Amino acid sequence: MNLRLIAIGAGVLTILSLPLAGAIAGPDLAGRGDGKGGGLLSSLGLSGPARPPDAAARAADRAASPGPVEQPRTDSRCGPELTAPQGLEAQTCVLEGDGQTWGRSYYRNTSGRALDAVLTVMGPAGRTVQIRCAVGPGDEPGLCETPRDESVGAPDGYSAVAEFAVPDDEGRLLLRSGSNSPAPREG
């Protein structure tokens, strides 16, 4: 009985190891046929090609191995990086890509207390999108981002404003950061 289980286990192990063995020794997926490419090691980036691949080889590589999908281009218009004396830094941007527009505010809150942020994107024809974000204390950077919306009109017809405030009854404003804010003046 034990010999039968060992034989079955050995057969299963052999069957399961065949694809791995084929991947390690595998064919050259780029079609170069030089015997130095392809296989598991090159797919893991552990061995490079013997010579730079030509355009046909690169196309074959892309077709044979799924990789990250090319992301559409994203354009951004950002205001200056601003700092509040209370320990808050922020920069606000309008982003546009793949026919959509949205707002994003990057921040770092070293004030030692939780804050509230309201990010508003204003577009052509009175279109407005607004979102509230909790801004935790800490030295790590964070971001607040509105949902993406279908772009209407010219990209320069959009602007974004982020307001950071103390979350109490008064809601004291600490910093207002805009995508089209002028650079702060010295002096």
Image (cartoon, rainbow, N blue to C red):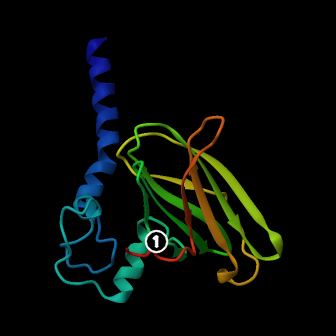
Compared with 128, 181 (above or below) is below
User: Which residue occupies the foreground of this view, 75 or 73?
Assistant: 75
The residue under the point 66% across, 35% down is: 169
In the rendered image, which quarter is residue 159 located in?
bottom right
The residue under the point 23% across, 84% down is: 52
Please state, as top left, top right, bottom left or bottom right, where the N terminus lies in the image.
top left
User: Which residue occupies the foreground of this view, 133 or 171?
Assistant: 171
Q: Position of residue 148 (x, y in %)?
A: 67, 62
- Asked whether residue 18 is in view, the answer is yes
Is 110 positioned to the left or the right of 156 in the image? left
Please state, as top left, top right, bottom left or bottom right, where the C terminus lies in the image.
bottom left
User: Which residue occupies the foreground of this view, 30 or 68?
Assistant: 68
Q: Position of residue 48 (x, y in %)?
A: 19, 71
User: Which residue occupies the foreground of this view, 30 or 10?
Assistant: 30
The residue under the point 57% across, 75% down is: 180
Q: Position of residue 132 (x, y in %)?
A: 65, 47
Pick out the residue farthest to the right. 125
Pick out the residue farthest to the top. 1
Per the image, label 1 sits on a secondary structure element best described as loop
- Asked whether residue 148 is in view, the answer is no
Q: Which residue is mark 1?
A: 80
Compared with 142, 3 (above or below) is above
The residue under the point 34% across, 40% down is: 16
